Image (cartoon, coloured by chain):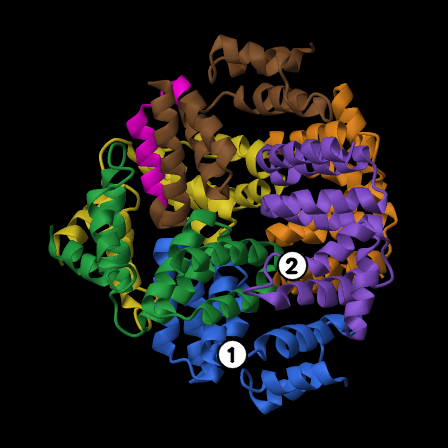
Chain colours: A yellow, B brown, C orange, D purple, E blue, F green
Amino acid sequence: MNERFTKGFETIKQYVTTEEAARMIEADALADIAPDLRKMIIEFAYGDVYSRPGLDAKSRALVVITAVVTQGAAPQTKTHIKRGLHTGLAQTEIVEALLQLVPYIGFPRVQNALTIAQQVFKEEA
Amino acid sequence: MNERFTKGFETIKQYVTTEEAARMIEADALADIAPDLRKMIIEFAYGDVYSRPGLDAKSRALVVITAVVTQGAAPQTKTHIKRGLHTGLAQTEIVEALLQLVPYIGFPRVQNALTIAQQVFKEEA
Amino acid sequence: MNERFTKGFETIKQYVTTEEAARMIEADALADIAPDLRKMIIEFAYGDVYSRPGLDAKSRALVVITAVVTQGAAPQTKTHIKRGLHTGLAQTEIVEALLQLVPYIGFPRVQNALTIAQQVFKEEA
Amino acid sequence: MNERFTKGFETIKQYVTTEEAARMIEADALADIAPDLRKMIIEFAYGDVYSRPGLDAKSRALVVITAVVTQGAAPQTKTHIKRGLHTGLAQTEIVEALLQLVPYIGFPRVQNALTIAQQVFKEEA
Amino acid sequence: MNERFTKGFETIKQYVTTEEAARMIEADALADIAPDLRKMIIEFAYGDVYSRPGLDAKSRALVVITAVVTQGAAPQTKTHIKRGLHTGLAQTEIVEALLQLVPYIGFPRVQNALTIAQQVFKEEA
Amino acid sequence: MNERFTKGFETIKQYVTTEEAARMIEADALADIAPDLRKMIIEFAYGDVYSRPGLDAKSRALVVITAVVTQGAAPQTKTHIKRGLHTGLAQTEIVEALLQLVPYIGFPRVQNALTIAQQVFKEEA
């Protein structure tokens, strides 16, 4: 556990519960073929990038949700809407961010993302 | 000038200077072949969507910048970085939002967007 | 029910059966979190855009099928192939439009779209 | 000149002037590094695909314009709008097809495509 | 069975087992609505393109895996990882190619592709 | 200059000339607004990813060229074709990799990439 990993792991706790953070390390679904992916996500994505100053966690979560919705990446849309709620984004803010995307990426990807958001909101209720 | 157009035009002023808002209406570059595009942008994008409550203008601007950068749409990246600055986003916040995208969309589109941001920052200085 | 909604709802009937049109309004799956999405689809997509003169409904359906197939948006590919059939597009015309896309978007997205078309054709038989 | 090439070359004449068709063969810009690309375009795209029965040339042109606009491929947007006009598509039909895309792919790519269409319409006037 | 089909069918055997090659012809899932798609894949993709000299089968497989992963095309990611293994690519080479994509397309599509690779590796074990 | 930076800088020399490697550090075009982007590219992309064992430099270059061509990222297509040549990829191998993409991403992006390749080949001659 180097310094970047520790920093990444501390930063993740702004985005997931302590239990989920522990699970991310203990139960890596890709550990058998690509154990370094998880390491890269914690060290690079969270340790180097998310932990930077100059933009608050809620805004970072909004930016990431927008990126994965624009790409049409369904599993990550679910993951990052959950993380966005954990940073303190209100359900309304997430819904509004998705509706704000309609004029820029069109209805199809927004509609698919809202269906995922609806499911996350139910699970978290 | 119907009610949605008026509402859209009022909302645009949070994103551009009064002079630019006036120019958007008086000097529509596509007026000869598709005059209704400008009308749709003002009535639908600004009148119906941007003007909704529940998310502040700075967050809406961040979401839109992220969407057009993720799509690789260069002219709109320039337009919406300018509008983001006008809503009060700091240059640092825009740069941080772009760097936050690296783990999600990769270096190429982020690098191209930062080059555009640099040019906008110079023009606005 | 404003004028645009009424116009949109009339236009939709060129693309879906009367029963489906009624269901679109009565049974909005996203009504709890984003009731305005349905409203935007009816008022903006159908009321403002699909209802424009200058291009017939079959051509509009072909254009929309092409867009969602090119984006790789599976649920919308199904929806709009069904609507295309309802406007009077022949199954052959839809298959030919998809094959015409091979040189422009490659085999993968065309193959996925043909699999969806095959399923729609069976359901509609 | 095999049968597919001949068929492709005949089919191309529905999409470009006879002069342009001749130029496509005589002046292949990529002849020095990839002479087979032009051959593939004529034999496969035009000989095998465009020449198929079951969908008229104007509809094929609309489908191809939509695909390249949705991808954001600027040089091909220009090429295929020109070819669309040559098949007999009216300028209005092309503009309407582009506006029809707004609810599905968003304003940015449509706006960029309309700017290209405007330029083609001027050059062809 | 023309010459290009024969050449394509021979080339396919570098990418799939003899049984699978036979099945591709005998059991075309889209035979009822688009029998020509299979024909185009064998004649054009394999007969004209894969069979070209100048790049070995393993490199062609790597290029194709990269393309479908970058597009986010899940069914084709599975298909082409299997074909890559058949050409002799090691599991490690495929995993490394996917990790190499992280800085260029971001974590989401790489993570989804590694999950598919993991499943293929299990099935082939 | 930490260990990852040093490792990244060593790895880069497989992809660019020593002069270019030096220039990448001394003349960072984005140094005024985002000095950390260059650092991330050297430390993460080259130090953590490109330097991994299990796949040779030529294959990594092919994978990266494919990714940026599939995304339609023009400036990076130029950069990575140059780096590919530096790793020892033959011009023919690069052209063949691009033609191999036609059945998977379509002619438009391949044609644009070949035009860029042609220019790089001339500059490097």
Q: Would you identify the image quadrant in which residue C17 lies? A: top right
Q: Quadrant of the N terminus of chain E?
A: bottom right
Q: Spatial distance from mark 1 to mark 2, Cα to Cα?
A: 34 Å
Q: Nearer the viewer, residue E82 or F54?
A: F54
Q: Residues within 10 Å of mark 1 (few under 14, many from 20)?
A: many
The residue lying at 60 percent from left, 74 percent from top is E49
What amino acid is at disc 2? Asp
Q: Which mark is residue D28?
A: 2
* Res C16 visible: no
Q: Would you identify the image quadrant in which residue E23 lies? A: bottom right
Q: Which mark is residue E47?
A: none
Q: Indicate the position of residue C39 as horizontal and vertical percent values.
A: 67, 29
Pair 1/2: label in front: 2
Pointer 1 residue: E83
Are callouts 1 and 2 both on one chain?
Answer: no
The residue lying at 38 percent from left, 42 percent from top is B110
Q: Would you identify the image quadrant in which residue C35 lies? A: top right
Q: Nearer the viewer, residue E62 or D6?
A: D6
Left or right: residue C60 versus residue B75 is: right
